[in-house]
Amino acid sequence: MVAIIAACIYVLVGSSVLRVFEQVRSFEAPSVSGRYVYLAVGFLVSLIVHEAGHRIAGAAMGWHCFRFGVGPFEFSRDGKGWKSRRVTVVWGAFVSQVPANFGRFRAQKAITLLSGPMSSLVFGLIFFGVAAAASDSATFGLFGRLALVTSLGTLELIPRLTKSGIGSDGYRLWELIRGGEAMDEMQWSGLAEASNATPLRHRDWPHALLIRLAERGDAYFIYLAYLHSMDAGDEQAAAAYMRRLIAGMPEENPSPYYSCEAVYWLAMFGSQAEDAAKWMNRVGEQPIDPETRLRAEAALAFANGQSERAITLAKEALSLISDQPATGSSEYAANRLRYLLNTLERQPTEPVSVNR
């Protein structure tokens, strides 16, 4: 409510100041329809300026943008390209981006949050400068209102939380300052996406964060902790997390990703081919990445002594992964498959390292 009141007061006062300037400089005031056009253009420009500020700061620190949207349109990464779709109209715009590493996360996140309002302020001042130097009514009318609307973005620094749970830049900055669970959420919500979009490995996720999350008992957090431990080569911790995950999974319509990971672990490390087969059956026809399904099927074939089938499935999965952008998640999956193939083809007498 405070932000809305502040915005209304700002627009009313700003509009009055513009009209005074027009009278002092003997500029013809735009028509009512002209003012609406200028304000509409200003609103669109302000959204672009504000979100571009977030993105430019993120890009400068190596953050990866995986989704952005404005109004009824959303654009998201699809392999090496982008795909678009129509969504419920959003009265604004957004940029979703994740870091390439979580070192000094608090500072990195604070910079991306501050960059939007700062961009709004800087461009608002630039537009005001252009308007002040204008020699005709049209230029003053356009850039004066661009300055007015664009600088509104600085009000995002006022902490507020909408009914839908979306916080302003200022609200999220306050959460960063407080730390605790709010900051944990900012990190865990981007872990999987970061490894899906950048070379960040699961083993490089913040270890202490994963331990805190897994203690909550949520299946997703346990799954993340399992991936982190498995990729780090801590098979004992991975086994403990996997047992907890399996114990909490429903027999009907379980997550296909959890199930496939359970199949792989039971077949390759748990020596439980029968249980692995049960979870493979529970995956059924649920939609899942073909390479993930193939990895589970290859591990199951290995556990059942079907070496040739396991090799064929593993190589097919590796072929699919090689056609994708190189990311931490794809490298994890490829290493799991290489471990399986090494076990079958090379039959090493010593443990095979799969984490390099």
Image (cartoon, rainbow, N blue to C red):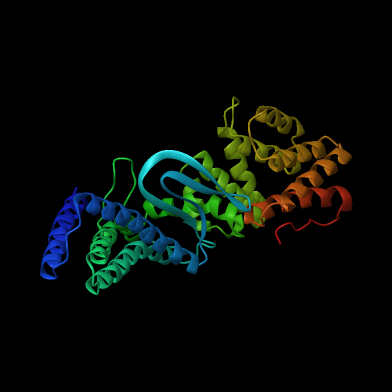
* Residue 62 percent across, percent down from the top left: 52, 66
Say whether residue 87 is left or right of residue 192: left
Above or below, 162 relative to 121: above
Report x, y in % for residue 225: 56, 49
Above or below: residue 242 compared with residue 191:
above
Picture coordinates of residue 345, whole percent (x, y): 88, 50
Relative placement, left or right, of 169 versus 344 is left
- Give the residue at x 62% y 42%: 242
Extreme-bottom residue of the structure: 133
Can you see residue 16? yes
Left or right of residue 336, residue 18 in this image: left
Q: Residue at x 37, y 65 (%)?
A: 115
Give the quadrant of residue 265: top right
Of 20 and 212, the residue lying toward us: 20
Q: Furthest-top residue in view?
A: 252
Q: Identify the image quadrant of the C terminus.
A: bottom right
Left or right of 176 on screen, residue 223: right
Viewer-side residue, 48 vs 314: 48
**Residue 283 placed where, x, y %?**
66, 30
Of residues 302 and 45, the one drawn nearer to the viewer in this rendering: 45
Residue 270 visible in the snapshot: no
Measuring 55% from the left and 55% from the top, which residue is drawn there? Answer: 194
Number of marks = 0
